[in-house]
Amino acid sequence: MSTDTTAEVSTGAPGTQDLDLDKLFAARLQAARARPYLATALFALHTVASRHVPTMGVDRHWRCYVSPGFVDRTPVEELAGVWVHEVSHLLRDHHGRSDRVAKERGLTGPGERLRMNIAADCEINDDVFGDGLVKPEGVVDPAFLRLPEGQLMEDYLRQFQLGPRTQELAWLDCGSGADGLDREWELGPDGAHGLSERERDAVRFRVAQGITGRPGSAPEGWQRWAEEAFHPPQPWRELLGAAVRSAASAPGAGEDYSYGRPSRRSAGVPKTVLPSLRRRPPHVSVVIDTSGSVSDVELGSALLEVAAISRAVGGRRDLVTVVPCDAAARIAHPLCRAEGIPLMGGGGTDLRTGFAKALRSHPKPDVIVVLTDGQTPWPDSRPPCRTVVGLFPRQYAGSAWDEDDPDYVPDSPPDWARVVEIG
Amino acid sequence: MPTRAPFALPNAFSDTDTGTDTDPISQLDVASDLLSLLRTTTTEPRPDTQLEALTLAVAADLPVLLWGEPGIGKTAALTQLAAALDLPLTTVIASVHEPSDFSGLPIVGDDPAEQGVPMAPPDWAVRLVRAGRGLLFLDELSTAPPAVQAALLRLVLERRIGALQLPPEVRIVAAANPRSSAADGWELSPPLANRFVHLQWTHDHEVVVRGLGGTWPRATLPKLAPERLSQAVDFARRAVCALLAARPKLVHQLPSSESRRGGPWPSPRSWEMTLRLIAFATASGVSRDVLSLLVRGTVGDGPGLELLAGLDRLDLPDPEELLADPASAVLPGRGDLRQAVLDGVVAAVRARPEKARWDAAWALLVRALETGAPDLVVVPATTLASLRREDWDVPAAIENLAGVVTLSRRADQAAARARTATKGRR
């Protein structure tokens, strides 16, 4: 295999073997042929020979550290898989996400960074191999940790601890590009051949553009990445807040000029009556799907959120009413008694009764917020007020739902409602 | 009379004989001395991307909107900027005003039917106009109710307050808290959002520590090089038009998501702003990082990145120049850019196939092979070989590319092995 060792460059310390660049680059070429949409990113990596890294590793400045020994003992087709694996760490911003997770959850220490590296590897390895790329020997995947496939690094991170099962992964090191922890032997931000933040963005953008421009050639995981690369899904709290606020604040829903009270400016303009800006706090009705398919935890978090938002837009607590609803709507409760609202229910859902109940209440709501998992018939016509739907996503609403149960297709929320996916 | 001023110092620090019973007035004087000592800070020049971006946008006379958490130093940055530009700073808290404060207050005169009712501007606007120049800072923009935002549209775009026209020397900067931290905030209306250059204002740990130690970074106006002006305008027009000609959909694109409408989005107006920013950035020679912040803050991330990618391509060496003189060609060091250049060269040969150009392209490929990674050369070499006409002799330079053929074959063999391996597993 490695008879033509014609390494052109060797930046390793004296005594190390030379890096077989021809073999490494043949592998990169194969990787680029197998995944044409990643070619830009693969070619943007700068190779550095290093004996500190056990296999191959990347730093956040898009340098790729390669162990000469690893290249020697690994066949080209497996090296190609490693190339794609390493570049995936960078494209998916694992270092940035690791830093954020570490800050959010207060994870410190090298052990936690190792866990992040393992979780990031799981996220990558469950969908990059196959289809012309061989899975390299000994890579970690979700099945190895007995975890389900297709999740994000952040989710995997919650589900396993270091223990006997992960003992043999202790050598795993994909560099600071994978887990955000700077290594001593890396060249750092001032070293040569690093990419600046803007250049990194440009490369990621071109890769994303290549994928969205030619849908069909890229697997679904990459397409999802490309869609979200520069527009990460926003936290639902913010979206729900935006929807409720804009529904409650749009002209006609609680704010207008009125002659009911003179403007404070009237004193300066004798003989004229100026209108003054008056805000009527909006009435908000929250229709809650209490059918068996929505969990209490989901409901609780969403209800709290709606209450906080509607308070913030000027609605006093007594202006928010809650309508629990499964197949039939029960009584509407004012929110000031929210602690004691019996969210009874279970069984099927028909939110139409909830809508009717909310609209019949007096005073009429300016905004209806519906919290549901979407397994319900919707009203045929647009209700006479703004509607925000907080939707709890369900598994079958994703990729595999038509295969699981081809007969059942829940109606999607109507287009007159602003829909926010929760969770 | 109280025996102690509110700011009285502990006895140990008092240097009077009686110690306790000092004059309250002098104590206040001491306090103000202390305060002025605390206020005395110096500035230092320091590379700061976001400050450079702010200064450049202000120089280009585009309204800037700073998004940042409360207390992060937006106002402090503005004060520094006003001092550096020697402009008087006028701060208006948008959220505590009524719409009529920005559209003008009606004043009834003697004969309204005959003379109409003039709309009188507020005093700060009058003072600003009288001064003839200044920095108008609209704070707390996102907490202003929609009706006030509507009134601000005219101020920001047409620079009119009531009957008053702001002079061209007045620059407008606004600040807003992101929706997540402004609990009682409103979404910025899309028309207002589209009039601003949005800058995310974050704090730099080092800058804050150094600033509290008494030294803040200094904002300097970008130095525009007079001899580069027409070239800069040319470049900016070429960059924006090339992109929009190829991607007509990007000209106007109102975001579909509720929360993104309050941010930057592409429209003819924001593209014109982008054009101006590119021209200013080119004429002053600021870094691409600064331009990136500005462009993405004007038309949004997606279109902004696409434009920047286009600029990168404009920066690459021209294939025709490379073909004219392959011996002294300088190819970019970064792999992906190098590949883009080589692809461009092959495309140029394909567009106008001539023997001399074909030979020059081979020479370029050999040069690329000698100075960088060989796998980059494989695809261009294959394509170039396919362009050969029957009467063209194979140039001697191809000998040097033998290694590339081996490399390519090796990748093919590996791919074949991978195919059987992945098939076998399924």
Image (cartoon, grey):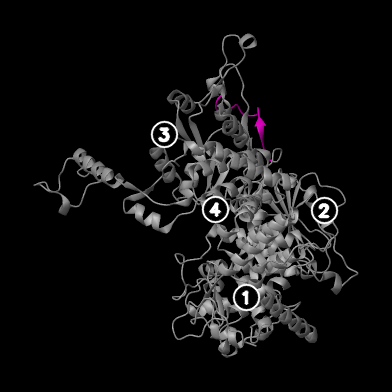
| Chain letter of the residue beneath label 3 in the structure image | B
What's drawn in magenta, residue-wise? A254-265
Is residue B102 positioned above or below A86 on the image? above
| Chain letter of the residue beneath label 4 in the structure image | B
Mark 1, Cα crowd under 10 Å, few <14 / some 14-19 / many 20+, is many
Asked whether residue A261 is drawn in magenta, I would say: yes
Query: Which residue is the site of mark 3?
Result: B87
Nearest the camera: B324 or B35?
A: B324
User: Mark 4 or mark 3, which has the lower sequence index?
Assistant: 3
Query: Which residue is the site of mark 2?
Result: A414
Q: Is residue B238 visible?
A: yes
Query: Which residue is the site of mark 1?
Result: A25
Nearest the camera: B18 or B102?
A: B102
Q: Kindly report the distance in space between the C-alpha atoms of the residues bearing marks 4 and 1.
A: 49 Å
Label 1 amino acid?
A: Phe
Q: Is residue B171 left or right of residue A329?
A: left
Q: Could you say whether the residue bearing mark 4 is in a helix, strand or loop?
A: loop
Identity of the residue drawn at 76% across and 77% down:
A131
